[in-house]
Amino acid sequence: MILFFIFFFIGLISFGGGYAMIPLIQTEVVERQQWIGMVDFSNLVALAGVSPGPIGLNLAVATGFIYNGLGGVIVAALGMILPSLIVMIIIARMANRLQHNKIWKYALYGVRATVTGFILYSAIIFIKTNHMISSNLYFTLTQLLIFLGSLFALFYFKKHPLYVIIISGLVGITLYS
């Protein structure tokens, strides 16, 4: 039951999508419940990010499986999905009134800035956990080059993220094997 309530709560208070949920999920499953270690969680974030579907839901499903197998998957997924479903039904019913409400509009400005902070926080934690910056200068520089190359491919060449992931994996194999 705790699994459902944890993901229901995360789904209820998270704004900005799955990447903004990562710090909340980390706090609950790594720090408070200690179901997963930080290195394993970081690996799950990477796998959830390259897997089809929303990253937050993917993390909930993976955590549910680790916690209690298939039953945990179902409970965690329902916990994550139900708040969004309920809130979106309510917002859809009120969309016309909220669209022109200045207080709602201003509140969303504040939430957007916070969500951006959550995403940046997740990126920094991911960098630290994966030791992308280390005393090994070769490793740090090559990680930085892969990172910059990925950004360049996405922004400048407008490459699909799937291609960037595949090429980055091949570069990793070439550089580190």
Image: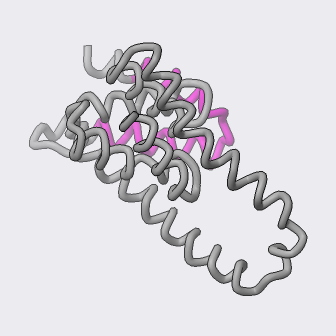
- Give the magenta-colored segment's residue range: 142-171
Q: Is residue 104 above or below residue 11?
A: below
Instruction: Using the image as rendered, state which of residue 35 and residue 153 is in the foreground.
Output: 35
- Depth check, front residue: 121 or 94: 94
Q: Magenta stretch: dominant SS? A: helix
55 left or right of 52 in image = left
Q: Residue at x 46, y 42 (%)?
A: 7
Residue 77 in which image quadrant: top right
Residue at the extreme right: 96
Furthest residue toward front: 1
Q: Position of residue 27 (x, y in %)?
A: 29, 49
Residue found at x 24% / y 39%: 33
* Residue at figure coordinates x 51%, y 58% from the top left: 13
Toward which corner of the image does residue 12 lie, by quadrant? bottom right
Is residue 139 shown to the viewer in this render? Answer: no
Q: Residue furthest left?
A: 135
